Amino acid sequence: MEFIKPGTNFDFVGKMKVAFGISMAMIVISIASIVWHGGLNYGIDFAGGTIIQVKFSTPFTIDKIREALRPLGLQGAIIQEYGQGEILIRIAAGASEPTGLSDRVAQSLKGALGEKSVEIRRVEMVGPKVGQDLTRKALLAIFFSWVGMLLYIAWRFEFRFGLGAILALVHDTIITVGAFSILNKEFDLTIVAALLTIIGYSINDTIVVFDRIRENMRKDPKKDLAAVINESVNQTLSRTILTSLTVILVVVVLFFFGGAVIHDFAFALLVGVTVGTYSSIFIASPLVLVWERYRPTGRKRKK
């Protein structure tokens, strides 16, 4: 099945400067948002603290829950609705003595809302040192995934292809993280897993285009690289659109109907897959052309 008719020749390379401008604007906005917010809104996994999931069998309001927590000194805790009749109470590290905290919270809520109306479903505690260690390991996981892919693509294709692919992945990661910062969404280990998934998806999409570029270069070594890139992207465009649409359809269903547990994970995939598809077409391959213009290969220098 093909959306794009054979022989179609969209001038993607001709839109290279516009695409680079749009990407730079999105990256600047993403970084500015992170700086403006004083960093990402780290979840308990990274920031440390306690998270308590509570289910209520009677109607409740956030204000009433916050008032019930006031005697414990937890009026500043973050309270978030979590599905039907449930909330998450996020308590920062050092805000209260962690020993017996869930029992004290349960007793305060039962006193305000009724003995049989409150059920503690889950309690998670992460110390500050553990949070720092998880942050470091998460950053290393993303960094080494970039390095590993750079080495593989440089060996499998050429260094210029590896560089273009990795810069496109950095582009995708920054913009996805920036979307979380702009919306002040919580950033935790689940989102790191989503970022690694996005990196895998995006690099697969990019390699398909690179493989076609290599094939076309072998067919006509004297053909201008810009024309080869345009031809290759057009030839793989139907495959790229079909793959992205099927993934996005599944992710949209998860986003709206998957429940609160995977809502942010689905959101990260939705942003990442969309941006990754865009970068595979407009960023990765044109970056190879930019590198060729400033650092021409031996074959081109001999002409």
Image: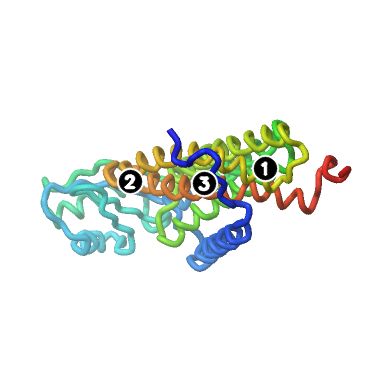
Crowdedness near tag 2: few (<14), some (14–19) or many (≥20) residues, C-alpha within 10 Å: many
Determine the secondary structure under disc 2. helix
Amino acid on which disc 2 is placed: Phe
The residue closer to the viewer here, 184 or 105, is 184
Determine the secondary structure under disc 1. helix
Please give left or right for residue 223 compared with residue 19 in the image.
Answer: right
- Residue 193 rendering spot, x and y as whole percentages: 47, 40
Q: Quadrant of residue 182?
A: bottom left
Please give left or right for residue 284 compared with residue 269 in the image.
Answer: right
Q: How many numbered callouts?
A: 3
Q: Earlier in the sequence, mark 3 or mark 2?
A: 2
The residue closer to the viewer here, 39 or 161, is 161
Camera sees residue 197: no
Crowdedness near tag 3: few (<14), some (14–19) or many (≥20) residues, C-alpha within 10 Å: many
Crowdedness near tag 1: few (<14), some (14–19) or many (≥20) residues, C-alpha within 10 Å: many
Q: Which residue is mark 2?
A: 255
From mark 3 to mark 2, how far is it between C-alphas?
18 Å
From mark 1 to mark 3, how far is it between C-alphas?
21 Å
The residue closer to the viewer here, 146 or 125, is 146
Residue ID at (54%, 41%): 202
Q: Which residue is mark 3?
A: 276
- Residue 178 rendering spot, x and y as whole percentages: 49, 58
Residue ID at (36%, 55%): 91
Per the rendering, the mark at residue 228 is 1
